[in-house]
Amino acid sequence: GEDVEQSLFLSVREGDSSVINCTYTDSSSTYLYWYKQEPGAGLQLLTYIFSNMDMKQDQRLTVLLNKKDKHLSLRIADTQTGDSAIYFCAERSKQGGKLIFGQGTELSVKP
Amino acid sequence: NAGVTQTPKFQVLKTGQSMTLQCAQDMNHNSMYWYRQDPGMGLRLIYYSASEGTTDKGEVPNGYNVSRLNKREFSLRLESAAPSQTSVYFCASSEDGTYTGNTIYFGEGSWLTVV
């Protein structure tokens, strides 16, 4: 079946890099996504990566994909207090194109 | 550009009451989804509609019904609300339900409390 796992919490100091990890089970997933959710708000798409790519960089964000290990990571460089939020990893299922989400990682950035 | 609009944003229900969450998108998307979000569990799919006139069960459909009224609108109904349905509900839409990179857009969420 389809399953996505993330660690629940991550705490970093302002200015450090944050790395949020995710594992998934569906090897046929074609797209993997990172969403950000701030308190009381909806989900904001940060970035996505196609399964035939190893890496994607977008300003302070770097996504690494290890397809063999089914491991996805999101690196945020120079983490700021405004990056404090819950980050969700998601894979896109072949069936109906729906997204399967991880539990979310709560990132806390301390000044 | 409104995107995905959900109503109501907040609702308190008594156990056994019924209600409908409304969702509309103005992007001419084919696929629409309803998710619920609970602490520590991420988002779980309740129902989805790959195209107008079709609906399918997701991961947690029990206690819910949906209706794809037309291409724009996808409603979620709780016939007899239970405290276990206290959650935040998100509607979403995407252009295509197949495995493409088309972005899935989310509404702002509806906070539902059942007492």
Image: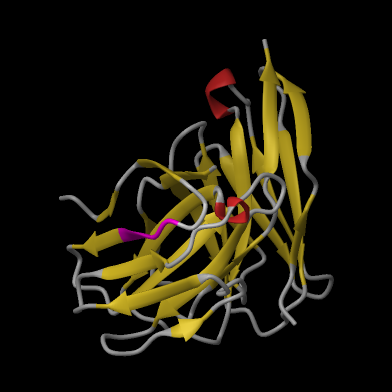
Residue at horizontal 50%, vertical 54%? A47
Residue at horizontal 38%, vertical 84%? B50
Q: Nearer the viewer, residue B14 or B41?
A: B14
Q: Nearer the viewer, residue A65 or B57?
A: B57
The spot of residue A79 in percent (x, y) is 63, 26
- Snapshot quadrant of residue A68: bottom right
Q: Which residues are magenta?
A: B17-21
Of all residues, the one furthest to the top in this rendering is A111
The spot of residue B19 in percent (x, y) is 36, 58
- Let me know if residue B18 is in the magenta part: yes
Q: Nearer the viewer, residue A88 or A80?
A: A88
The spot of residue B35 in percent (x, y) is 50, 62
Can you say whether A101 is above or below A31 in the image? above
Q: Which quadrant of the rendered structure holds the C terminus of chain A? A: top right
| A61 left or right, relative to A12 | left
- Let me know if residue A37 is in the magenta part: no
| A43 left or right, relative to B49 | right
Residue at horizontal 46%, vertical 53%? B89
Q: Nearer the viewer, residue A10 or A30?
A: A10
| B11 left or right, relative to B25 | right
Give the main secondary structure of the magenta stretch: strand
Q: Which quadrant of the rendered structure holds the N terminus of chain A? A: bottom right
The spot of residue B88 in percent (x, y) is 50, 48
Can you say whether A16 is above or below A93 in the image? above
